[in-house]
Amino acid sequence: MAKASAPNETPDTAPVPPWERTRKAKAQTRTPLSQDTIVEAALHILETDGYDGLSMRRVAAELNTGAASLYAHVANKDELLKLAIDRVFGGIEFPEPDPEHWVEQVREMMRGTRRVLQAHPGIARAMLGQVPFGPSGMRIVEGFMALLRAGELPDRAAAWAGDVVSLYTVASVFEEDIRYAQHGDSSREEIEAWAEQMKAYVKALPVATFPNLVALADPLFETGGPDGRFEFGLDLMLRGLASYSRRNES
């Protein structure tokens, strides 16, 4: 049986060089550009390369195109970050406000927010300093304000608490991202050994000069993971916030 000719070949012509075939194959598999594909690429880069690794040029390389072609869909890196943040916000949920259980509802919303951010490494750093004016962000802020107002907080307390509690949640994930970047290759045993070294150092400090550090050395270096400390901080904030509620006056 005669061998079939490759595209652009005839029995009387030389075959297409293999490097040309590879180049054409890449061109044929290039992902069609859209705002959605650009945002997805940005989120992937944030996860793999971190916040500092994100650039329009890096996104273009991820999509096998030139940086100039991105600007038909996204104005600049700042807009790209806003779009990526809003995409992540779309995965955050909140309940219908229940005045009898508003504190627990806020607690669960922040836990859920933290889980969503943890699933997208690098996005917490991108969120710092950003105001969530995207469609999903506005929906989340509106829902959060509804929960806080269900607790009959004064207007200023509700507005400022929304900012402070959200910032605490985002910052906790940002710190985790930093720790992972520094110690991501370390085993749990290695991290615990490192904590034990620091604890031993603090315990050996002169008690007359550092009485409180020495006394608190054990709880300071507990390695129960970030969840316990996050829950403690969140509970601390919500207990204080509940003290502002006018529901306590009835």
Image (cartoon, rainbow, N blue to C red):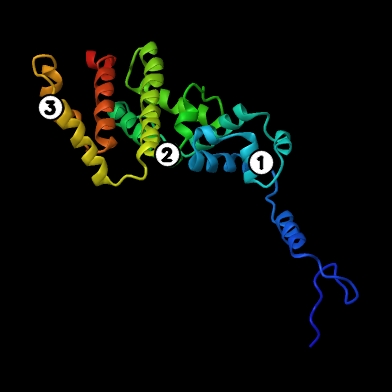
Residue indicated by mark 1:
60
Taking the image as shown, residue 2 lies to the left or right of residue 65, namely right
Q: Nearer the viewer, residue 127 or 13?
A: 13
Q: Within 10 Å of the Cα at label 2, are there few (<14), some (14-19), or many (20+) other Cα atoms?
A: some
Closer to us: mark 2 or mark 3?
3
Q: Position of residue 142 (x, y in %)?
A: 47, 25
Residue shown at the point (34%, 35%) measured from the top left: 111
| Quadrant location of the N terminus in the rendered image | bottom right
Q: Tag on residue 203?
A: 3
Q: Which amino acid does label 2 sit on?
A: Val
Q: Is mark 2 on a helix, strand or loop?
A: helix
Closer to us: mark 2 or mark 1?
1
- The mark that comes first in sequence, 3 or 1, is 1
Taking the image as shown, residue 191 lies to the left or right of residue 110, namely left
Taking the image as shown, residue 88 lies to the left or right of residue 163, namely right
Q: Nearer the viewer, residue 57 or 102?
A: 57
Residue shown at the point (59%, 39%) measured from the top left: 39
- The mark that comes first in sequence, 2 or 1, is 1
Residue indicated by mark 2:
116
Whether tag 2 and tag 3 are in contact, CB under 8 A, the answer is no
Furthest residue toward bottom: 1
Q: How many marks?
A: 3
Residue shown at the point (65%, 39%) measured from the top left: 35
Q: Is residue 149 above or below residue 185?
A: above
Q: Which of 32 and 30 is in front in this view?
A: 30
